[in-house]
Amino acid sequence: MKKTRIRSVLALGAALAIALLPLGSGPAAQGKTIKIATQSPLSGGQAALGEGIKLGTQLAVEKFKGNLEKAGFKVELVPYDDQAKPDVGVSNAKNIIADKAIMVVIGHLNSGVAIPSSEVYKEDTLAMISPANTNEKVTDRGYPNVNRVCGRDDVQGPVGAEFAAGTLKVKTAYVLHDKTTYGQGVAEAFKNDLEKKGVKIIGFEGTEEKSNFDPIITPIKAKNPELVYFGGIYDQGAPFFKQAREKGVKAKFLGPDGMDSSDFVKIGGKTVVGTYYTTAAAPASSPQAKQFGEDYKKKFGKNPEPYAAESYVATAIAIKALEEVTKGGKAPSREAVSAAIRKVKYAGMTGSIDFDDKGDPKKASYYVMQVTTDNPEKWSENKEAKRLAIAAPAMKK
Amino acid sequence: MDFALLVGIFPQVLLDGLLLGFMYALIALGYTMVYGVLEFINFAHSEIFIVGAFVGAEILLGLKNTGALETLPWALVLLGVMLAGMLASGLLAVSIERVAYRPLRAAPRLIPLISAIGMSFFLQDVIRLVESLWRNAFNLVYPTLEPLNERFELSSTIDVSAKSLVVIVVALLMLWGLHALVNRTKIGAAIRAVAEDQAAASLMGIDVNRIISLTFLIGGAMGGAAGVLFGVQYSLINPYTGFIPGLKAFTAAVLGGIGNIPGAMLGGIVLGLLEAFAASYMSLLTGGAFGAEYKDIFAFSVLILILIFRPKGLLGEVVRERA
């Protein structure tokens, strides 16, 4: 997701949104229906993760909508497919703000899509709670309507670095990234922090290659680093790690939460067992998370993908805020919902969440996980190698 | 700069480049065959290629589910899967020609070109639709044929996998076979005649439509075989995977002299080597200032230079054989 493209889409989106919006849109007109929208890729290479966001939200809506229904509201879920593309996300966002019954958006999967889309939501202070967007800029813009229940790349990178230098005690590392807002961002944060800790970075490269990693792997093998880091998503990371291992690279493998999908082992097979990844998604070991996993499996016939749990939590927070603003059966306004979300304190399976003044959780948990089996069905049984609770950095001026 | 490192990886990079080059060469054949006969670029060839890969993957997955994948000899499995991929891609190419190109044969040159681009997009989404209905999947992972993953260490710095050797051997066999077919058989003579002059060929009693269909069948089949080998080699395919290798192979065909079979092979290998060397050496030589992501820029700059000095491609003028 190239910066220039995002910028132009953003400008266009903002311009259109201003042009199309009636000034000072007040409280929702329809009143008696409250819609909760999801935006995530439901088709394409990351559909598995995107569908998890939709289904996690669906489960939470069904579980928690009771009070709102008692107060006389109909609660509906409206899923949108952003195809992991910024332009699609923005055009969906315009449809979403046009539908006055939509009070909150749960999404997106990709930071590169969430950032321009939330510019559109902001026009009407429509609340967005992100289950998965870890890029700093998502909340660092300080928008009153943008929140997330997950961690941040500028912390996730250092968490990886802390683990590599402190726990694995590597001396040399090779860093590759996918040149996206997300992948490059987290890779640079990782690299900078690792250098500070005295680990030698013997290579830092970006690539858009998806199939043939041979020419990249040959120099890596010759330089023989102790650790190889890939900043990106599993559909590129898994083939890269697989080919590297097959080609005889002996290093330990580490990646960010983009590797956190059962498809990672489906693609990589035995070669990627033992890979470490950092994630802001809680492992399915706590009792609450176990319960969620069972409910999810019963309802949808499959194990929850990463971020399904975060989506569930995000939705629970949204519904709590909605209950607050609809007290006495009064129709909610988007501004009121956005403001109420910031005040919610929620203790769920991903830890207790309350938001700081820019929409980050005051304290987020980060996990380093290790792949333990090549069976995709057992992805949720991956081993927790390290856990860190770190406060979000204060807003940069 | 570490001189020993630069020298040390040289043979391995050469091998990587050759392997990639043969892959491009196999795909490039489809472009070059069709161009030779119709002087028209079949942009849907990249999807014809990836359909072969998908058919191969489906058969392998089927065999894996029944457990036959472990028991059958790998060479037989690979041969069967390749034949199936070739058949599927070949027939697809023939039907595309029948539906999208033949009705436009009398139209200006640009019209079938646009039709081909449209066909390419159409096929990408058809594959996506079928796969998501059938498997609810976007990425398809090739089941591994264990013996093909074996690696041979030639020295401490060079090693080569069995599947890479298979790709190179199969590519050489197919290129040789195609060359022989076009130059030494009666069918080949008919193909060359149609390429030379359709009207005259038809006066000589050659069924031009049949020969054109045959050309698409052969070109498509080559693409299908390349697709299966691509899947075996790189193990992950999705409906859009074909696009980039297709574009590169098309470039390889132009580089070698489009319409020329040995040219497609040479062009593929030159492009593969350029890419491999650029990706492996750029960051080493520039101290990280230009990384592997510039490989295409480097490779294509060289291509532009070559085409400035040899506009008809490397072999475009030397050999006056079109097919």
Image: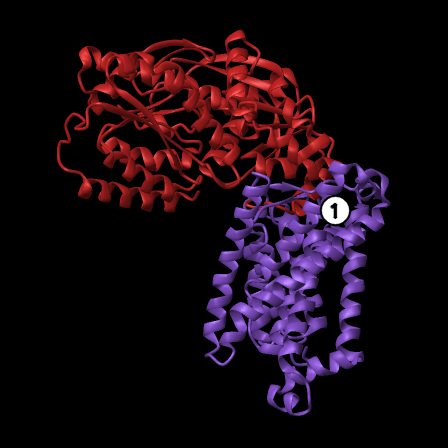
Chain colours: A red, B purple
Left or right: where B309 falls relative to A338: right
State the residue position of label 1. Answer: B9
Q: In terms of image quadrants, where is residue A364?
A: top left
Q: Nearer the viewer, residue B41 or B84?
A: B84
Left or right: where B319 falls relative to A298: right
Say whether residue B25 is visible: no
Residue at point 46%, 26% (across, down): A55
Label 1 sits on what residue type?
Ile
Left or right: where A12 falls relative to A250: left
Residue at point 31%, 42% (across, down): A10
Crowd class of label 1 (few under 14; some 14 to 19; many from 20; radius 10 Å): some
Q: Nearer the viewer, residue A256 or A264?
A: A264
Q: Nearer the viewer, residue A173 or A154?
A: A154
Residue at point 64%, 39% (across, down): A239
Question: Residue A356: x percent and y percent?
Answer: 33, 15
Q: In terms of image quadrants, where is residue B186?
A: bottom right
